[in-house]
């Protein structure tokens, strides 16, 4: 039984076929020759989507952290140093919104995308294209909301 292996209940399962030494394992570029960044932009793989959620959550964490540092710098001394009262209130609101909605939630979603299918033994999530669409809608909406703060009045 060299072509297949039999498990305990008698089911015959084929052996995994591994690429030969020096042979391309199919990672990096598709058969169409597109670069690997296009694979990341159009992926439906739950691990890649989870990674993109985690990376975008970290980016928004940095943006929210910069707002927190600006607020702390404003509060370092009495009076107005960096921002007006209105700008401080806007920074406070944006900091809270970014940290809750654009950092904490996608952090949870990223780990859930990465870990949950592996825990239950599923090959992928139930609706992988909807999962991809949800990420891109999150990124588009969050970017508009976050960077709208930095536009002039």
Image (cartoon, grey):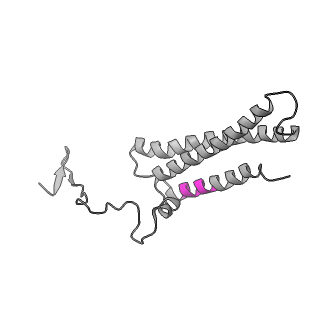
Residue 99 falls in image quadrant: top right
**Furthest-left residue in this view:** 1
Q: From where the camera sits, is residue 125 visible?
A: no
User: Which of these two is toward me, 77 or 107?
Assistant: 77
The residue shown at (41%, 67%) is 30
In percent of width and height, residue 114 lies at 47, 45
Q: Name the side, left or right, on which 122 lies relative to 87.
A: left
In magenta, the rendered stretch is: 130-137
User: Which of these two is toward me, 77 or 41?
Assistant: 77
The residue shown at (76%, 33%) is 73
**Furthest-bottom residue in this view:** 32
Q: Is residue 136 magenta?
A: yes
Q: Is residue 65 magenta?
A: no
Total numbered labels: 0
Q: From where the camera sits, is residue 38 visible?
A: yes
In percent of width and height, residue 6 lies at 17, 49
The residue shown at (17%, 55%) is 4
User: Which of these two is toward me, 31 or 120?
Assistant: 31
Q: Name the side, left or right, on which 12 lies relative to 137.
A: left
Residue 66 falls in image quadrant: top right
Q: Which quadrant is home to the N terminus?
A: bottom left
């Amino acid at each position: 039984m060299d072509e297949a292996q039999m498990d305990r209940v008698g089911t015959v399962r084929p052996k995994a076929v591994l690429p030969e030494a020096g042979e391309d394992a199919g990672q990096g570029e598709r058969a169409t020759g597109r670069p690997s960044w296009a694979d990341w932009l159009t992926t439906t793989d739950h691990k890649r989507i989870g990674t993109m959620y985690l990376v975008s959550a970290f980016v928004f964490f940095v943006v929210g952290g910069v707002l927190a540092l600006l607020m702390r710098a404003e509060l370092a001394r009495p009076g107005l140093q960096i921002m007006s009262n209105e700008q401080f209130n806007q920074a406070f609101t944006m900091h809270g919104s970014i940290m809750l909605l654009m950092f904490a939630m996608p952090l949870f979603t990223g780990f859930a995308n990465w870990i949950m299918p592996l825990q239950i033994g599923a090959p992928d999530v139930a609706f992988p294209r909807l999962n991809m669409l949800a990420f891109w809608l999150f990124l588009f909406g969050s970017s508009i909301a976050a960077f709208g703060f930095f536009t002039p009045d």
